[in-house]
Image (spheres, rainbow, N blue to C red):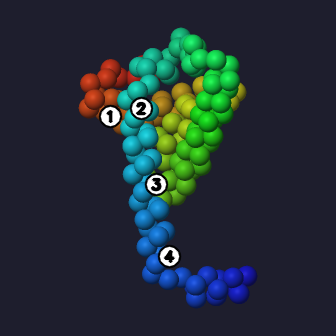
């Protein structure tokens, strides 16, 4: 263990620090853009119990299947990124919410409702939607 720590500190260079900082900054801003686009684009009644979703209804089964797999992978990556952002700066809770919205997993609706039901999260989402002229989210 001590050898690993010693090797880490001796191999740490300004270039590696700059690369790590650049990756952090790029991923931070990319997550903010993704969160903003999804929050603005989802229907206002998405979090309502009456919402029925039909993903790519006119596409062939192969396109729908491939898009579903891709959508789930992106959602999983966003959930992981959101968890990492809970520790560091960033929109962690909203990023986790967007990841859950994208994924097709059983039991996600109650978890989504619990996250969006938090007053600060709902206020941030509705503030963003208002900025782009969208109606506020309806939460049951």
Of 91 and 25, nearer the camera is 25
Identify the residue position indicated by label 2 in the image: 39
Identify the residue position indicated by label 3 in the image: 27
> Could you tell me if the residues under marks 1 and 2 are in contact, i.e. CB atoms within 8 Å?
yes
Q: CA distance from mark 3 to mark 4?
A: 16 Å
Lateral position of residue 134 relative to residue 85, left or right: left
Q: CA distance from mark 1 to mark 2?
A: 8 Å
Mark 1 or 4, closer to the camera: 4
Q: SS at mark 4?
A: helix
On the image, the x and y values in percent for residue 24 come to 46, 61
Identify the residue position indicated by label 4 in the image: 16
| Residue drawn where x is 26% and y is 24% of the image | 133
Q: Earlier in the sequence, mark 1 or mark 2?
A: 2
| Viewer can see residue 140 | no
> Could you tell me if the residues under marks 3 and 2 are in contact, i.e. CB atoms within 8 Å?
no
Q: Earlier in the sequence, mark 3 or mark 2?
A: 3
On the image, the x and y values in percent for residue 55 come to 58, 19
Of 139 and 135, nearer the camera is 135
Location of residue 4 with respect to 79 vertically, above or below = below
Q: SS at mark 2?
A: helix
> Could you tell me if the residues under marks 3 and 4 are in contact, i.e. CB atoms within 8 Å?
no
Of 62 and 53, nearer the camera is 62
Mark 3 or 2, closer to the camera: 3
């Amino acid at each position: 263990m001590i050898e690993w720590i010693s090797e880490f500190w001796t191999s740490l260079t300004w270039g590696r620090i700059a690369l790590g900082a650049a990756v952090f900054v790029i991923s931070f801003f990319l997550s903010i853009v993704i969160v903003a686009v999804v929050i603005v684009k989802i229907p206002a009644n998405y979090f309502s119990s009456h919402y029925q979703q039909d993903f790519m209804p006119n596409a062939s089964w192969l396109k729908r299947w491939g898009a579903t797999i891709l959508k789930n992978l992106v959602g999983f990556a966003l959930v992981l990124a959101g968890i990492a952002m809970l520790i560091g700066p960033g929109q962690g809770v909203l990023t986790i919410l967007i990841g859950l919205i994208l994924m097709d997993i059983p039991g996600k609706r109650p978890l989504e409702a619990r996250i969006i039901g938090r007053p600060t999260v709902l206020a941030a989402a509705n503030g963003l939607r208002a900025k782009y002229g969208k109606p506020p989210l309806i939460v049951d």
